[in-house]
Amino acid sequence: MGEMVTIPIEEYTALQEAKEDLADIVASERVKAAVARGDDEYVPAALVKRILDGESPVRVWREHRGLTQVALSDASGVNRGMIAQIEGGTKAGSVQTLKALADSLGVTVDDLI
């Protein structure tokens, strides 16, 4: 058996909490660096709330990017009518369509599903 150290439980608990805090700080710094490089972005809470409330993610991201349906259509090559149907919930859009929209919006397909 190796060497052992006995410490009060309060000190052990404090060390465990400090370890968790350090892990949180490291993760936070990783995200900040990704944002600074342009590899990631902060998503406003209002945008997340709109999506969680059931609004079309395509519409939410399009409006967040300041695009009209026509501008998104031009950028993605997806017909404006299809974009309107996806935003309106009458069509789901194929994987290829969602990929084209996601690429033009600068998000992942997962962000649009």
Image (spheres, grey):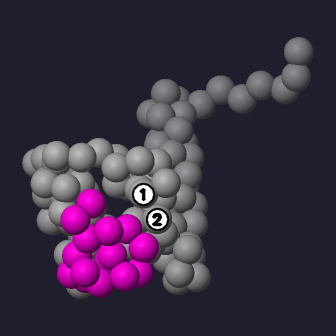
Q: Is residue 58 left or right of residue 76?
A: left
The structure residue drawn at horizontal position 16% and vertical position 48%, both measured from the top left corner, is 89
Q: Is residue 61 magenta?
A: no
From this view, report whether residue 94 is shown above or below residue 107.
above
Q: Is residue 67 left or right of residue 18?
A: left
From this view, report whether residue 16 is shown above or below residue 84.
above
Residue type of the residue flagged with mark 2: Ala
Q: CA distance from mark 2 to mark 1?
A: 5 Å
Q: Which residues are magenta?
A: 67-82
Asked where in the image residue 68 lies, by quadrant, the reply is bottom left
Name the mark on residue 100. Answer: 2
Q: Position of residue 30 (x, y in %)?
A: 57, 66
Q: Main secondary structure of the magenta part?
A: helix
Q: Position of residue 98 (x, y in %)?
A: 41, 56
The structure residue drawn at horizontal position 49% and vertical position 27%, both measured from the top left corner, is 9
Residue type of the residue flagged with mark 1: Thr
Mark 1 lies on residue: 97
- Contact, CB < 8 Å: mark 2 with mark 1? yes
- In front of the other: 5 or 107: 107
Q: Is residue 33 left or right of residue 113?
A: right
The answer to whether one can see residue 64 in this image is no
- Give SS at disc 1: helix
Asked where in the image residue 109 lies, by quadrant, the reply is bottom left
From this view, report whether residue 41 is shown above or below residue 112.
below
The structure residue drawn at horizontal position 29% and vertical position 45%, both measured from the top left corner, is 92
Q: Residues within 10 Å of mark 1 (few under 14, many from 20)?
A: some
